[in-house]
Amino acid sequence: MATPEQIQNLQNSFERAGISPNAVSTSPSQTSYFQSKMRPRAMSMSGQAKPLKPFNTEDIKILLLENVNQTAIDIFEGQGYQVEFHKGSLPEEELIEKIQNVHAIGIRSKTKLTQKVLSAAKNLVVIGCFCIGTNQVDLDFAATKGVAVFNSPFSNSRSVAELVIAEIISLARQLGDRSIELHTGTWNKVSAKCWEVRGKTLGIIGYGHIGSQLSVLAEALGMNVLYYDVVMIMALGNSKQVSTLNELLEKSDFITCHVPATPETKNLLSGPQFAAMKDGAYVINASRGTVIDIPALIKAMQSGKIAGAALDVYPNEPAKNGAGLFSDELNPWISELVQLRNLILTPHIGGSTEEAQSAIGIEVGTALTKYINEGASVGAVNFPEVSLRALDLDKADVARVLYIHQNVPGVLKTVNNILADHNIEKQYSDSQGEIAYMIADISGVTQGEIKSLYEALSATPLKIAIRVLY
């Protein structure tokens, strides 16, 4: 048995490591994985990266909305950026006023960055969506303004998958109803239509980051797993891909959706699909609110065709937390929905865990910082993915040109003619649709020459945006 002195020594070692011995443990993903991603690439003899700064030496201004995680704030403040933080989203007119002078904005799912809002942004360089989806941003218009958009496509995958597992078991055992009954003083111990999930079939629509993780967890519970996806994807474990959505609907006891919001997925599950399901099947949606036709689901549950459902997302969602916001004024069928039995309703919390939000803050915060400081656009969803290795600290009189332009022939010839008096050490260019992006490191350039280079590149007719880092 450990002595009091040994225990005290162990506690002291925890404290030196910045860990409380009484703290709830967290996923290792935010430490091991993301720290490894953030390690700098190999440098030359100096062993250090040369710090770059924007041509305009005014401090970078960051606007963060919707309670973006503290990990992102720490990253931005560590860079010396000016950070303005709001716990909620902003009304459109206030957002238009705030976005005019910021260089970067971080949002989650409630803030809508429409063409109207983005048109007001004079200095905006980059947008960070601290979530999976990017449908709240006008991606095409942002690209035409030279604004890159980053998101976090997989950091909350585990959190969403675990929520779905919890909902599968809760629906099978009618836990929601039993809990509500007991809260109101009703003792109702029943086993009718309550099931084990072992041996049941889970049908997963969309076998991406979340769907595949869910597949592994479900098999660990003894479930059979089928999945449907528009592309062929290698199965994990003993799961099997089916060739049609109808086959999945006909064979599954539980059906869960993990697809993006697109015109093709709108009302993906509606009246005909519910009719094709087994009598007494269960439906779960933790993807996007438009994927399920909720009025049709209400009818299917009222008729007894669907035995239970869990919804975490809705076509229209409140812009903030508060009582009385989830009402018919938001969606006209809500008062009818909330009367259904064996229905779990949650307020878009699939990725709302400490681990997921911390990891998202690190991932998106790091991506935005690398784009602002280095011009690296790898991971951007609306933009060519371009990156150059960091400049070495021992490199003098070197500048990095970031040139976003229309994707037409002859532009690079014009740019390289401007840069021709200097040595182009590294250069990389790529295009996506009508947008092209070039990064070039040029040496033998003094600070006095940087302004004239900037002005010459700014005068080129097909330029969308330009930055010079030095």
Image: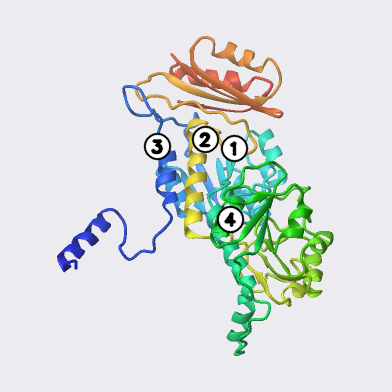
**Residue at x-position 51% and y-position 43%:** 61
Q: Residue furthest right?
A: 272
Residue 290: image location, x then y, percent: 74, 56
Mark 3 element type: loop
Residue 39: assigned label: 3
Left or right: where 155 falls relative to 139? left
Mark 1 element type: loop
Residue 386: image location, x then y, percent: 56, 28
**Residue at x-position 60% and y-position 71%:** 196
Q: Nearer the viewer, mark 2 or mark 3?
A: 3
Q: Assess whether mark 1 and mark 2 are in contact (beta carbons under 8 angstroms).
A: yes
Residue 210: assigned label: none
Q: Nearer the viewer, mark 4 or mark 3?
A: 4
In the figure, 215 relative to 42: above or below?
below
In the figure, 282 relative to 351: above or below?
below
- In the rendered image, the quadrant that contains the N terminus is bottom left
Mark 2 element type: helix
Q: Earlier in the sequence, mark 3 or mark 1?
A: 3
Please give the residue where the numbered disc 4 appears in the rendered image: 214
Q: Assess whether mark 1 and mark 3 are in contact (beta carbons under 8 angstroms).
A: no
Amino acid carrying mark 1 in the image? Ala
Q: Earlier in the sequence, mark 4 or mark 1?
A: 4
Q: Earlier in the sequence, mark 2 or mark 3?
A: 3
In the figure, 242 relative to 314: above or below?
above
Q: Quadrant of residue 178?
A: bottom right
Give how far apart the Cα atoms at labels 3 and 1 are: 20 Å
The residue carrying pointer 1 sits among few (fewer than 14), some (14 to 19) or many (20 or more) residues within 10 Å by Cα, namely many
Residue 9: image location, x then y, percent: 19, 60
Residue 380: assigned label: 1
Please give the residue where the numbered disc 2 appears in the rendered image: 371
